[in-house]
Amino acid sequence: MTASALCQILAPSAGATLPVAGRGPDIGSSSHAVASDLRSFPDIAGEPIPFGAARYFGAAADKDVGASVVGMAASSGGRGYWIATVKGTVLAFGHAKPEGSIRRDAHCHVVAIAATRDGRGYWLACNSGAVLAFGDAERHGPLNARGLRSPVVGMAATPRDKGYWLVTSGGAVLHYGNARFLGSAVGENLGDRIVAMAATPDGRGYWLVAADGRVFRYGDARFFGSATGEHLRDHIVAIEVTPGGRGYWLVASGGGVFSYGDARFFGAASSAIRENPIVAAAAVPDGDGYWLLPSTEAPFGLPPPGAGFVAGHVTAIGDSVMLDAQPDLEADIKGIDVEAEVSRQWDQGIALVQQLKSEGRLGAIVVIDLGTNGPVSPEQFTEMMDVLAGASRVVFVTVHLPDSYSWAESVNATLEQGVPRYPQDRLADFNKLADENPQWFGPDGVHMPIGGTGAQAMARLIQSEI
């Protein structure tokens, strides 16, 4: 079972039970994590990296898929696997049989794939909460989950394939069919967004894992350790469980593998995997190995970053306007770390950039969306770029403010004059788009409905400039 790849639920769809908070998490580090014995592998986009008894059967790189890969699931017996793309194309290798893909015209941003126990079918989960079934997989709902405050990022199926769970980046858990609700991370101190989930073999529990390595357990799922003490330079993207449910692996985007409980360590990809970060993983059903799946989307041929930056990753720093677009940014840009806060000033943004860089947590691609709350001088722009020296790409977003905000024009003028001075900089002119679409905004003329057309347009604009 695999889940990849990222608040609350305002109104649950039919069949979903969503109490405000679930059972408390177990959070901590474990001495069972293995960070040594790294091996170097070719940096090939979309080519699964096998460890232990896992065998290589083929790569997405061999196919013209036209979209980034997001998920992977092993066939029964581990003699094959499926790879799913963000647009819903499913590629089958080895004994895994192709059971279908999502129509090209369907509006579905796929985030996870889960296979049936007999390996004759699979489900695809979309970030909207929609689930599509193929082969002998039964769809238990929904066609679309209403009222999501954050996108669906992971999926896990029950042992007899009669139900499944979905989890959002905010920690909400939706359940369908015979999948029971056992708790959620809504209201917990997440520390970072949820990125994946996995179920216990008996279906009476599940784990949620956050990007920073925190593990939350519910039902009969036991806590065996977390990666919060492993000094991660990148972020966790997947959790895989051993056959008996007495252990699990956490997989990081840089190729690190951390094993806990009875999960055996079979190796990890070298952190030299830079241009094609790991986006998903799958375990051999008997627990004797696993695959790591690198992305098929390299960061657009960008130059390697300098010291203090995490290659292949995106960090977005903004104020309350970026909060409006956060769910869409997380949906459109795989693994993005959105650091947005109400009333954040430009100087506070500089301080945050310095902190993240000193901690080795700043992405090589940085998005800055600040200026809503006060003027920005050319000197402040230069100070920001001094800290960002060595980044592969920096995207500055222009602000859209009513005339009553006296500093609006000066902020955008500072950005327009500063960006051309740095070859790695790009200007995402959201203000121009916003002027043409006043209907995107609420009564204050500044903020947009979360998930609304304006927020979606902002996310797409930022993505296009990376």
Image (cartoon, helix red, strand yellow):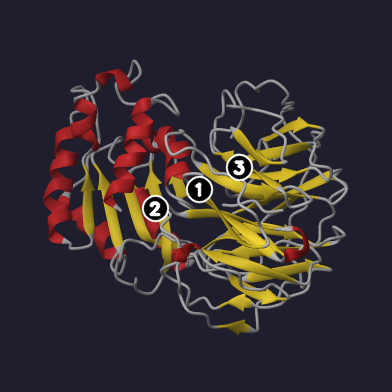
Q: Is residue 212 visible?
A: no
What element does badge 2 sit on? Answer: loop
Q: CA distance from mark 1 to mark 2?
A: 9 Å
Eye-nearest disc, 1 or 3: 1
In percent of width and height, residue 402 lies at 22, 23
Quadrant in which residue 150 is drawn: top right
Q: Amino acid at mark 3?
A: Leu
In percent of width and height, residue 173 lies at 69, 36
For residue 174, side relative to residue 331 (left or right): right
Residue visible at 34% across and 28% down in the picture: 454
Residue visible at 41% across and 25% down in the picture: 452
Label ID, residue 89: 1
Residue visible at 64% across and 60% down in the picture: 81
Tag 3 residue:
124
Q: CA distance from mark 1 to mark 3?
A: 10 Å
Label ID, residue 66: 2
Q: Earlier in the sequence, mark 1 or mark 2?
A: 2
Label ID, residue 119: none
Q: CA distance from mark 3 to mark 2?
A: 18 Å
Depth order, front residue of 344/320: 320
Q: Earlier in the sequence, mark 3 or mark 2?
A: 2
